[in-house]
Amino acid sequence: MDTTIIYGKNAIIEALEQGEREFNKILISDGARSDVKTEQIKKLAKQKGVIFQFVTKDKLNSIEPSGKHQGVIGLVASVKYVDLNEFISKHKNETTGVVILDGVEDAHNVGAIIRSCLCAGIKGIILPSRRSALINSTVEKTSAGAINHIDIIKTNSLVSAVQKLKESDYWVIASDHHAEQNHYEIDYTDMNFALIMGAEHAGISKSLLKLSDFKVKIPMLTNFNSLNVSNATAIILFEYVSQLSKKTKRK
Amino acid sequence: MDTTIIYGKNAIIEALEQGEREFNKILISDGARSDVKTEQIKKLAKQKGVIFQFVTKDKLNSIEPSGKHQGVIGLVASVKYVDLNEFISKHKNETTGVVILDGVEDAHNVGAIIRSCLCAGIKGIILPSRRSALINSTVEKTSAGAINHIDIIKTNSLVSAVQKLKESDYWVIASDHHAEQNHYEIDYTDMNFALIMGAEHAGISKSLLKLSDFKVKIPMLTNFNSLNVSNATAIILFEYVSQLSKKTKRK
C-alpha cells in the first residue's frame, strides 16, 4: 500500500478528527515537550484506535528531513482519489464548482489552493496525473488539513476531463491574462463551473483554452503583471463567494 | 554593510533591470548550461557595471543550501527601508493604500503578499522590526522581484505607525474573521487606507484592532474557516482593484 506522511500538529489533529484518512501509525518524538496539541493527538489516537509510538528525534528527521515535523509524524494511506464520473454523478442535483490545475507544480501553491477551494465551497480539484505536484506531505501541510474535506480527481487527460464536464452541463472558465473580460464580469452563481488555472509562466495549454466557454483576467494596477497562482485562484474564487453572499442577502 | 542574496534567474534580471538594488557581485556556476536568461544576466551586468564571477556549483550551494539558485546568485546590499514620515509626505497628494503585516512570519507568505500588493497598486508595506519575516532571499525570490518596486517600511511600534497614519488622513481597516462587515461592503476607492493583516492563528493584536476604523471579514462557504494569509490579503486587495476598475469604466 502507498503510504504518505502528515506532519504539523494541526494537520494531524485535523486528519484524526475528520477520520477520512487511514492512519497506519503516529510517531512522536520521545524528547518532545508535551504540550496541549500533542496531548490532544494522543487522546484522539486512542479514541480512533490509531497506534502511536515514541521514537527518537533522529528517526523523525530521517522521515521528514526539513525538520518541520514539530515532533509528530503521522503515517497514513495516500489520498484516495475520486473518479470524475463518480464526482459528476454525486453532485448532479446541485450547482457545483470545480478547479482544474493545469501544470501547477509547486507543492506550496497546490496546498494553498486546496485550502482556498475548500473555504470557497468548491467541491473538487482536478489534477493531471503528470506535470503537477503529487499530493505529498508538503501539500498536506500547506493545505492545513483541507485536503481531507475535498475530492481530488486525477486524470490522464485534462482535455477529456474538460470535455466530459462540458457534456455534463459545466461551464468552463479559463484564467488567462490575455483575456478581455474581467473576472468579476461573470455571474458564477447560477451555473456549474470548472475554473482552469495554469502555471505561472506557461499559462493554460492551448487545447484547454480552446475548450473554454469564458476567458477571464484579473485586472492589475501596475505593469508588474504577475500574481502568484494560489493568490490568483483565491481572487477569482472569492469573487464567486462575494456574488453568492450578496445574492443570498438580497433574497 | 549588510549583504543579502538574490537567487532565481528571473529575480536577478528583475533587480538588475530595475536598478534600485545595489549589487556587490553576481556569482555564476561555471558548470551551468548557458541559456537565454543567464546570457541576459551577463549582458545586463555589463551594462550596469556589475561584476560577475564564475564559481563552482559547490560554492553556490554553500551560499544557498536549498539548491534552488538555478546556477546564479546575486549578492546585493540589503533592502533599503523607507521611513514612514517620508512615505506619507511622498504620497500626500494622491489616494494611497498601504498594507500592515502584524506578525506574519512565514517568508513565502511575505513574498507572495509583496507581489500581490504591487499588482494591486499598493504603495507601501509596513512590517514590525521584530516578530515578522526579515526581508531575506526567500522573500525576495517569492516576491518575484516585486520587492524592488514597493516601499518597505519597518517600525519598532505598529501602534505608533497606525496612529501616525490616522493623523495623516488614512482610514485603518483590520481583517478580522470575527468582524460583522464583509470585506466587499467597504468602498476602498475614495480614501487613503491602511489594511492590517494578522498572523493566521493569532490574528491582529488587540491594540491594533482598537485603533481600526473598520473591521472586515471574508465570508466563507464552509466551516473550514482558515485561509492562507497571503490569499486572504490578495482577496481583499483585489476587491479594491475591482471597485476601482468598475468605477473607472463608469466614468
Image (spheres, coloured by chain):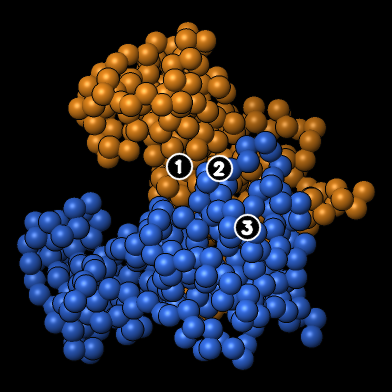
Chain colours: A blue, B orange
Which quarter of the figure has residue B169? top right
Which quarter of the figure has residue A92? bottom right
- Determine if marks 1 and 2 fall on one subunit: yes
Callout 1–callout 2 Cβ contact below 8 Å: yes
Look at the image and tell me in which quarter the N terminus of chain B lies. Answer: top left
Q: Position of residue A151 (x, y in %)?
A: 44, 77
Residue at 85% x, 48% y is B248
Crowd class of label 1 (few under 14; some 14 to 19; many from 20; radius 10 Å) = many
Q: Is residue B89 above or below residue A24?
A: above
Secondary structure type for disc 1: helix
Q: Position of residue A135 (x, y in %)?
A: 34, 65
Cα distance, mark 1 to mark 3? 27 Å
Crowd class of label 3 (few under 14; some 14 to 19; many from 20; radius 10 Å) = some
Q: In the displayed structure, does residue B68 sit left or right of residue A150?
A: left
Secondary structure type for disc 3: helix
The residue at which mark 2 appears reads as B115
Cα distance, mark 2 to mark 3? 26 Å
| Nearer to us in this view, B166 or A179 | A179
The dot on residue B193 is none
Output the chain of dot 2.
Answer: B
The residue at which mark 3 appears reads as A209
Q: Is residue B164 above or below residue B15?
A: below
| Nearer to us in this view, B15 or B236 | B15
Output the chain of dot 1.
Answer: B
